[in-house]
């Protein structure tokens, strides 16, 4: 500060005024152009942000048609809960973005499967958000399929929601990707017994899926006066 002049405060004031002028200019653009410009500006701010390592620091609005559900989500919501989610979004707005991974321009959902569905399938919500959905990009270190599956489970487990059968299938897929039990337990927040139980649920069925078994023996009936037939059996000698 010099002679009562705060240089930093003046710079901030000038920057804020310039942003306001810019926003007035884009207010008259078509909605798609507005969203494109705003997303670009947010990205520039994000790159300069001290919190740029946090996915939530950059929330972008993406057309719902470019957001696609994953094929492994182990969470399920009953119709009444889906309706509650719709009511919540209509009353409170989207308070949580959908966590995604950008794959060639398509956003694959990591967390927010049902927020994605409501934004697409519920007409009142879709119209209010103008056919867009709020998304964030998962960390680049988590973009491998196995890491994304683990991230989905961590989000679901933090909320206490997951289906055991689907969780079991995910554990098996991670094992096929050469994840050790220790790594699975560490990344999914499970103890060794839980990893073992989930492996056994689908693992036993998978183990015997391609096996052929002989037909089971079925006892016949013996009519009065008939002798039992011991075909196929050997008599055991008593010691």
Image (cartoon, helix red, strand yellow):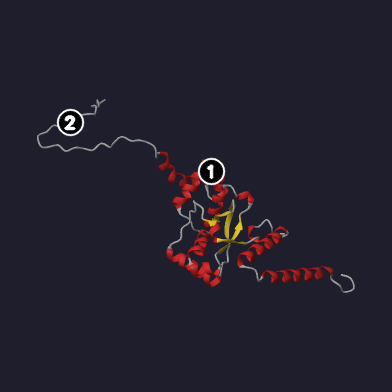
Task: Determine the secondary structure under disc 1.
Answer: helix
Where is residue 37 drawn, in percent x and y? Answer: 67, 63
Q: Which residue is mark 2?
A: 229
Q: Is residue 18 left or right of residue 139?
A: right
* Left or right side of 217 for 107: right
Say which of 237 and 182 sits in front: 182
Residue nearest the viewer, comparing 11 with 188: 11
Q: Is residue 166 visible?
A: yes
Q: Observer-nearest residue: 43 or 225?
A: 43
Question: In the image shown, does 209 or 90 lie closer to the viewer?
Answer: 90
Residue at x 90% of width, y 73% of height: 3
Q: Residue furthest left?
A: 225
- Where disc 2 sits, the SS reads loop
Instruction: Residue at 77% x, 68% y: name it.
Output: 15
Q: Is residue 207 left or right of residue 69?
A: left
Q: Report the quarter where the C terminus lies.
A: top left
Residue 141: x %, y % from top left: 63, 49
> Residue at the right extreme?
3
> Where is the N terminus found, in terms of image quarters?
bottom right
Query: To which quarter of the image does residue 233 belong?
Result: top left
Q: Residue at x 70, y 70 (%)?
A: 25
Residue on which disc 1 sits: 181
């Amino acid at each position: 500060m010099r002679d009562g002049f705060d240089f930093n405060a003046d710079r901030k004031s000038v920057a804020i005024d310039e942003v306001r002028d810019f926003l007035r200019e884009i207010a008259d653009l078509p909605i798609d152009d507005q969203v494109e410009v705003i997303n670009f500006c947010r990205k520039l701010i994000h790159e300069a942000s001290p919190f740029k390592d946090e996915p939530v620091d950059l929330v972008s609005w993406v057309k719902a048609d470019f957001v696609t559900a994953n094929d492994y989500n182990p969470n399920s919501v009953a119709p009444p809960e889906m309706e509650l989610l719709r009511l919540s979004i209509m009353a409170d707005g989207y308070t949580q973005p959908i966590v995604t991974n950008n794959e060639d321009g398509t956003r694959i959902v990591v967390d927010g499967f049902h927020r994605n569905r409501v934004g697409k399938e519920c007409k009142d919500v879709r119209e209010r958000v103008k056919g867009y959905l709020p998304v964030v990009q998962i960390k680049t270190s988590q973009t491998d399929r196995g890491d994304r599956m683990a991230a989905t489970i961590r989000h679901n487990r933090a909320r206490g929601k997951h289906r055991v059968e689907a969780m079991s299938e995910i554990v098996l897929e991670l094992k096929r990707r050469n994840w050790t039990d220790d790594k699975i337990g560490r990344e999914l927040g499970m103890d060794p017994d839980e990893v073992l139980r989930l492996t056994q649920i689908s693992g036993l069925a998978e183990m015997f899926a391609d096996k052929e078994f002989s037909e089971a023996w079925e006892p016949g009936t013996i009519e009065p006066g008939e002798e039992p037939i011991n075909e196929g059996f050997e008599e055991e000698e008593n010691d």
